[in-house]
Amino acid sequence: MKLTEIIAKLGLKNINKKPIDGDMDIRHGYCCDLLSNVLSSTPSDSIWMTIQSHLNIIGVATMTDIPAVIICEGFDVPDNVIDKADEENIAIFKSQENAYQLSGKLYECGIR
């Protein structure tokens, strides 16, 4: 599924400062706040849902080739994290919903 379709269906708020590639294909979703699990378990064409909003999430996304991250439950994301996401071409989003709710919606969209 194209990232633009996911953004629309989930009502995500893009917080990148520069344009993102909405045409990228997302095939998997992963929900986890433990960074070591994300490093060892997430396929590269995933969208990652977490409440973590510190700089290390961009490092993990970069190391695992995760192209998109959703910060759940409306947690604030510091500017330095957004700047690093832009630098690494990681799409970063916010949602007021929790990871369980978002995971269900992604599943309904065919994202496994």
Image (tube, rainbow, N blue to C red):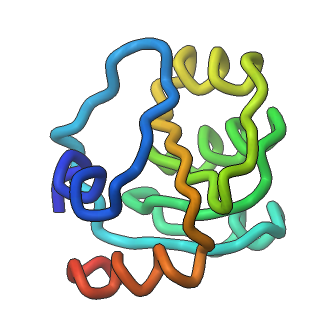
The residue shown at (40%, 50%) is: 12
Residue 13 picture location, percent across and down = 43, 41
Left or right: residue 60 versus residue 30 is right
Q: Is residue 112 above or below residue 59?
A: below
Give the image quarter of residue 96: bottom right
Q: Is residue 54 above or below residue 27?
A: above
Left or right: residue 107 versus residue 90 is left
Q: Is residue 13 above or below residue 49?
A: above
**Which quarter shows the N terminus?**
bottom left
Residue 16 picture location, percent across and down = 49, 24
Give the image quarter of residue 49: bottom right
Left or right: residue 34 versus residue 87 is right
The residue shown at (47%, 74%) is: 102
The residue shown at (45%, 57%) is: 44
The residue shown at (60%, 38%) is: 62
Number of labels in the image equals: 0
Residue 34 picture location, percent across and down = 83, 69
**Which quarter shows the C terminus?**
bottom left
Give the image quarter of residue 104: bottom left
Of residues 90 and 74, the one nearer the viewer is 74
Residue 94 picture location, percent across and down = 55, 46
Left or right: residue 51 versus residue 95 is right
